[in-house]
Image (tube, grey):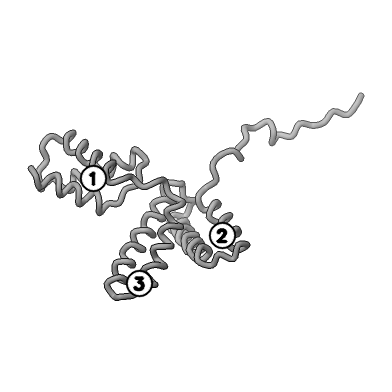
């Protein structure tokens, strides 16, 4: 009887390798690429992002899903924006530029940010759904608007949303 090739159990299972790569793995891959390219600015930013993600993983005591990873990156961007403001006030333009460059690298790992027009439309829709909220309801309007953006998978700046909600409610 001729020897038949044994079918590997790996091939009989659905291929798990076609799934999108977790964010932290993609960042690790890009760190290697940046090292090879000797791109120091990108490399230091990616290392900082990776350590922030690893710290959050340790705090959570389990791997982060992409939503959680994106939340960490959004926090890093927010910190950079605050730093830029401080550096600009302090006359340290080269430091502000460095932070701005880091934001560009970090944002490349996030879904595209919503435009101000998209945010305005979302805020107006939220206010319309709530009936006639007043300035006292600002917190609820913010919560509902942010939930709507998150559900749609849109990345928004909370400060922009807050300013637009204030503007809309002030007219009422």
* Residue situated in front as seen by the camera: 75 or 62: 75
Q: Which mark is residue 31?
A: 2
Q: Which mark is residue 93?
A: 3
So how many labels did they put on this image?
A: 3
* Quadrant position of the C terminus in the picture: top left
| Quadrant of residue 117 within the rendered picture | top left
Q: Looking at the image, which residue is at 38% across and 52% down? A: 71
Q: Looking at the image, which residue is at 59% across and 66% down? A: 38
Marks 2 and 1: CB-CB under 8 Å?
Answer: no
* Residue 30 point in image, percent of width and height: 56, 56
Residue identified by numbered label 1: 143
> In whole angstroms, how far apart are the C-alphas of marks 3 and 2?
27 Å
Q: Is residue 56 left or right of residue 43?
A: left
Mark 2: secondary structure: helix
Mark 3: secondary structure: helix
Q: Looking at the image, which residue is at 25% across and 39% down? A: 122
Compared with 2, 128 (above or below) is below
Crowdedness near tag 3: few (<14), some (14–19) or many (≥20) residues, C-alpha within 10 Å: few
* Residue 89 point in image, percent of width and height: 27, 72
Crowdedness near tag 2: few (<14), some (14–19) or many (≥20) residues, C-alpha within 10 Å: many
* Quadrant position of the N terminus in the picture: top right
Compared with 130, 65 (above or below) is below
Mark 3 or 1 closer to N-term?
3
Mark 3 or 2 closer to N-term?
2
Crowdedness near tag 1: few (<14), some (14–19) or many (≥20) residues, C-alpha within 10 Å: few
Mark 2 or 1 closer to N-term?
2
| In this rendering, the label closer to the viewer, 3 or 1 | 3
Work out which residue is located at the far bottom of the displayed protein and give it.
Answer: 91
* Residue situated in front as seen by the camera: 106 or 145: 106
Q: Is residue 124 left or right of residue 153?
A: left
């Amino acid at each position: 009887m001729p020897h038949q090739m044994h079918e590997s159990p790996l091939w009989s299972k659905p291929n798990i390798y076609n799934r999108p790569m977790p964010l932290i793995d993609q960042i690790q891959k890009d760190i290697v690429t940046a090292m090879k390219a000797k791109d120091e600015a990108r490399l230091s930013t990616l290392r900082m992002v990776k350590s922030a993600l690893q710290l959050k993983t340790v705090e959570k005591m389990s791997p982060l899903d992409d939503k959680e990873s994106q939340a960490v990156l959004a926090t890093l961007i927010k910190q950079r924006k605050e730093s830029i403001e401080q550096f600009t006030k302090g006359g340290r333009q080269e430091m502000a530029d460095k932070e701005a460059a880091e934001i560009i690298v970090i944002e490349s790992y996030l879904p595209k940010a919503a435009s101000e027009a998209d945010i305005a439309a979302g805020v107006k829709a939220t206010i319309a759904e709530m009936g006639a909220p007043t300035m006292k309801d600002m917190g609820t309007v913010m919560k509902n608007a942010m939930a709507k953006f998150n559900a749609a998978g849109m990345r928004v700046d909370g400060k922009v949303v807050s300013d637009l909600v204030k503007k809309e409610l002030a007219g009422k």
